[in-house]
Amino acid sequence: MFGWVKKAFRAKRSDAHKTAHQFWKDCSNTFLAGDPTYYDRQEIALRATVSTLQPSPQSALDIGCGNGRFSMVLAEYVPQVRAFDLSEVLIQEAIKLATERQSTVRFESRDLEQGIPEGEYELVTCMGVTSTLIDEAAFSSLLDSWLKSVKPGMFLITKDSLSETEPRAITSGPYVTIYRSKAVYEDRVQKLGFKALGCKQLAAANGLVNCLYLWQKAR
């Protein structure tokens, strides 16, 4: 079903993309923002968004779940949640945390280059992932996977750091982070067939803005 997506993700990658990919594969800390209150704001915004969805989703997929903190927030509102991340270390942390909290989230270590898990979900979340995808082909493949994995009429939540003007690539230690144009990002998602239902700004600085979006797929 997703063979063409897998092929696209496996296409030849630039050196910058490979370096960023390896960094996140080896990552053992999912909370890199300098402001310690940022993730609390993200959780508040996520709860406020998911708790009011109508119809209420019964299944969810969390793409790039990190240590599972926000996947377990989803599980408080959605009966079936599946989550994956590139980092094996973070997934093991998520599994441990889920066991301690008796959460029913199904976690797995998975590379986007394998394609996302097959199936359609009533809610798909993808938070903090697109800026790690340096090559445009990988970014486009991720967007296509959103379209394939969300059931018609149901919901997509994305959270990304974006540039208010032109795209910007910023080197941070050994890897590059790409901040795509906010206007172009929004246009790309809308052209897939998603309607923007809301946008909550979580942070802004130096021409960059971090936003949590709620989208609904056309029926």
Image (cartoon, grey):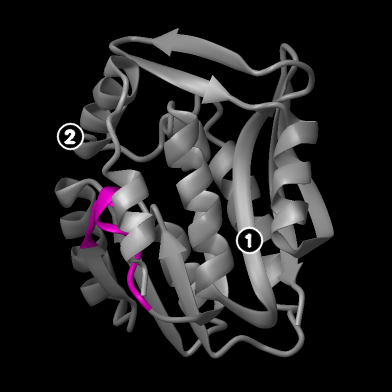
- Location of the C terminus (image quadrant): bottom right
Look at the magenta stretch and give its main secondary structure. loop
- Quadrant of the image containing the N terminus: bottom left
Image height check: is 138 above or below 66? above
Residue at image point 43% right, 26% down: 134
Q: Position of residue 161 (x, y in %)?
A: 62, 32
**Residue designated by label 2:** 26
Label 1's element? strand
Residue nearest the viewer, comparing 72 with 166? 166
Question: Residue drawn 29% across and 82% down?
Answer: 102
Over which residues does the magenta segment extend? 109-118
Q: Is residue 48 left or right of residue 101?
A: right
Q: Name the kind of residue labelled 2 in the image.
A: Asp
At horizontal 42% and vertical 70% (from top left) the residue drawn is 72
Q: In the depicted view, which residue is nearer to us: 103 or 161? A: 161
Residue 22 percent across, percent down from the top left: 21, 29
Q: Amino acid type of disc 1?
A: Ile
Residue 89's disc number: none
Q: Is residue 117 magenta?
A: yes
- Examine the image and state in which quarter residue 97 appears: bottom left
The answer to whether residue 128 is visible is no
Q: Is residue 163 left or right of residue 75?
A: right
- Residue 199 seen: yes
Q: In the image, what residue occupies the spot 50% across and 72% down?
A: 149
Q: Is residue 140 above or below residue 43?
A: above
Instruction: Identify the mark at residue 157; answer none if there is no mark.
Output: 1
Residue 175 position, x and y percent, is 33, 16
Question: Is 123 above or below relative to 146?
Answer: below
Q: Earlier in the sequence, mark 2 or mark 1?
A: 2
